[in-house]
Image: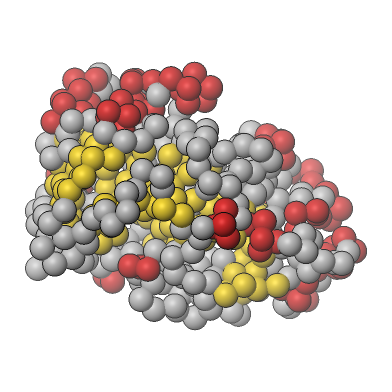
C-alpha cells in the first residue's frame, strides 16, 4: 500500500489538446488558483539513478533500458528534455483536473498573463524556467551550459541554474557527495585544450584542473553559463532556465565513457572538431575565480515575512543574480504540525512537497512514500500569479510531522531577494 491513495494513473486521463480553456478554468476555480500537476519523469542514458526520487524500483527503466534509468523529476516544466530518442512529451508537465489532463505549456499559451503575470508574459510569452530533482548514485561529468549567445548559434537558449540539497531527500549521500566547480586559479587554456586532445586516450584528467567542494544538505549554489561543474551525488533541487543545453568536457566517469557527441551536441556542426572554439565556450574568468565559493555558495535565509517564533517559517533557498539579472528564486516553507498560515508572494510559482501532508487553498497535499511511473500524486501544484499575490492558505493536517514545501519563481519576480553572500550577515 502506498501512502498516496490516488488510484488513477496518467493513462486513465483524457488528453485535452484543443479548446483547453473550459477544462483549465474549471481546474483553477476548483483549486482557488492552485492547479495540480502530474509527475514528470526524465531518464539520462549516461548516468545511474540514485534511487531517492521515491520512484518504484521496478520503474527505474520505464522508458526502456536503452534510454537509461530515470534519475530526474521535473517540476512546472514547459521545456522539452533534449534526450536522444525522447517520447513526444518528455520533460513537459501536465495539469490534472478530474479525468482530464492538458500540457502546462498549452495552458500558459492560452491564458498567458492570467497564469504567470504580465511582466513575464509580455517579455517571454512563455514560462521560461523550470526546476527538477536530479538524483544520481555517483557524480555527473564535468560540464557546462552555454550562454544565450552561444546557444543561439544552434537555435537554443542558454542555461543558468541553481542547486539546493533538501535534507528530506538526502538521508544517504551515495557515492560522491562532492561537486567539482570551475578550474584551479592559474589553469591555462592550453592545459584545458590538452584534455580535449586526449579524449580517446583514456581519462582526459580534466578533474586534475578543478577543485571539489563538500556538499551539505540544506545548502546550495548558484552557477552561471560557461562554468564547468561536476555535480556530486546528493539529490538536488535545481531551479534553472528553461533550456536543456550542455557540453560534457569530461570523457570518463566512474569507468563509464562519455561520448564526444555529448560535448558538442549544442555547438554548430562546423565547430565539432574545433578545439579552440570549444575551449572558448567557457567563461574563463568565472572558472578560475579564486573566490569561487564566496561568489556562488548559498545558505538559507529566513524571509522578512516570517515572524519570530512563528509556526510557519519561510526561507530563501535560491537567490542572487547572474550578470546583474535575477533568473529565478526559490523558497522553502515549513508549517509545524497542526498549524496554518497565509503566504503572499509576488508572482506565480511551481511547488513540490518534500515532507508531510496538508492543504493549499483547500487542495490536498501529501508527500508520497513510493510512486509508480504512471501514478498520479498529491505532491505537486502550480499556483497562478493572482492567487500568489492575494495570498495562499497553507494548512498542516498532521499532528506529528511538519509540512515542508519547495517553490520556485520566474525571472525578476522577487527584487527584494537576498544576494550571494548575504547569509554571512545574518
Q: Is residue 109 shown left or right of residue 287? A: left
Quarter of image, res 20? top left
Q: Nearer the viewer, residue 116 or 372?
A: 116
Q: Is residue 202 above or below residue 289?
A: below
Q: Nearer the viewer, residue 198 or 341?
A: 341
Residue 228: x and y in percent read: 69, 59
Q: Is residue 50 shown left or right of residue 196? A: left
Quarter of image, res 390? top left
Q: Is residue 378 above or below residue 147?
A: below
Residue 94: x and y in percent read: 29, 39
Residue plotted at (88% across, 64% down): 188
Q: Could you tell me how many numbered marks the image carries?
A: 0
Residue plotted at (70% across, 61% down): 292
Whether residue 271 is visible: yes
Q: Is residue 365 shown left or right of residue 346? A: left
Whether residue 16 is visible: no
Q: Is residue 260 shown left or right of residue 110? A: right
Q: Residue most toward the front?
A: 308
Q: How is the image coloured?
A: secondary structure
Residue 217: x and y in percent read: 44, 69
Residue plotted at (32% across, 54% down): 308
Residue plotted at (64% across, 43% down): 322
Q: Nearer the viewer, residue 325 or 240?
A: 325
Q: Nearer the viewer, residue 400 or 10?
A: 400
Dividing the image into 4 quarters, which one contains the N terminus? bottom left
Residue 355: x and y in percent read: 25, 61
Amino acid at each position: 500500500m502506498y501512502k498516496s491513495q490516488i488510484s488513477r494513473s496518467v493513462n486513465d486521463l483524457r488528453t485535452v489538446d484543443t479548446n483547453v480553456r473550459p477544462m483549465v478554468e474549471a481546474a483553477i476555480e476548483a483549486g482557488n488558483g492552485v492547479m495540480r500537476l502530474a509527475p514528470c519523469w526524465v531518464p539520462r542514458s549516461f548516468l545511474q539513478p540514485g534511487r531517492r526520487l521515491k520512484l518504484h524500483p521496478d520503474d527505474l527503466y520505464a522508458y526502456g533500458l536503452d534510454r537509461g534509468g530515470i534519475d530526474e523529476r521535473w517540476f512546472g516544466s514547459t521545456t522539452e528534455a533534449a534526450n536522444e530518442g525522447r517520447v513526444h512529451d518528455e520533460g513537459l508537465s501536465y495539469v490534472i483536473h478530474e479525468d482530464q489532463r492538458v500540457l502546462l505549456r498549452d495552458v500558459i499559451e492560452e491564458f498567458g498573463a492570467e497564469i504567470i503575470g504580465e511582466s513575464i508574459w509580455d517579455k517571454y510569452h512563455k514560462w521560461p524556467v523550470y526546476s527538477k530533482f536530479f538524483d544520481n548514485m555517483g557524480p555527473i561529468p564535468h560540464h557546462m551550459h552555454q550562454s544565450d549567445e552561444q546557444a543561439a548559434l544552434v537555435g537554443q537558449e542558454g542555461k543558468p541554474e541553481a542547486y539546493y540539497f533538501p535534507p528530506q531527500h538526502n538521508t544517504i549521500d551515495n557515492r560522491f557527495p562532492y561537486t567539482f566547480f570551475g578550474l584551479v586559479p592559474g589553469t591555462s587554456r592550453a592545459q584545458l585544450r590538452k584534455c580535449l586532445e586526449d579524449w580517446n586516450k583514456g581519462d582526459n584528467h580534466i578533474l586534475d584542473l578543478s577543485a571539489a567542494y563538500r556538499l551539505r544538505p540544506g545548502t546550495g549554489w548558484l552557477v552561471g553559463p560557461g562554468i564547468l561543474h561536476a555535480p556530486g551525488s546528493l539529490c538536488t533541487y535545481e531551479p534553472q532556465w528553461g533550456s536543456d543545453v550542455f557540453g560534457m568536457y569530461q570523457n570518463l566517469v566512474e569507468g563509464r565513457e562519455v561520448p564526444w557527441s555529448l560535448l558538442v551536441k549544442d555547438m554548430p556542426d562546423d565547430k565539432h572538431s574545433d578545439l579552440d572554439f570549444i575551449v572558448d565556450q567557457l567563461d574563463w574568468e568565472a572558472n578560475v575565480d579564486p573566490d569561487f565559493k564566496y561568489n556562488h555558495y548559498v545558505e538559507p535565509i529566513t524571509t522578512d515575512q516570517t515572524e519570530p517564533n512563528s509556526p510557519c517559517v519561510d526561507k530563501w533557498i535560491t537567490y542572487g543574480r547572474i550578470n546583474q539579472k535575477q533568473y529565478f528564486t526559490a523558497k522553502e516553507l515549513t508549517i509545524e504540525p497542526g498549524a496554518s498560515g497565509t503566504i503572499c508572494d509576488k508572482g506565480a510559482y511551481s511547488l513540490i512537497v518534500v515532507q508531510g501532508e496538508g492543504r493549499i487553498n483547500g487542495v490536498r497535499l501529501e508527500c508520497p512514500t513510493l510512486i509508480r511511473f504512471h501514478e498520479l500524486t498529491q505532491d505537486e501544484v502550480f499556483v497562478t500569479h493572482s492567487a500568489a499575490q492575494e495570498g495562499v492558505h497553507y494548512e498542516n493536517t498532521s499532528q506529528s510531522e511538519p509540512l515542508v514545501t519547495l517553490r520556485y519563481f520566474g525571472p525578476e519576480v522577487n527584487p527584494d531577494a537576498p544576494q550571494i553572500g548575504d547569509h554571512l550577515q545574518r
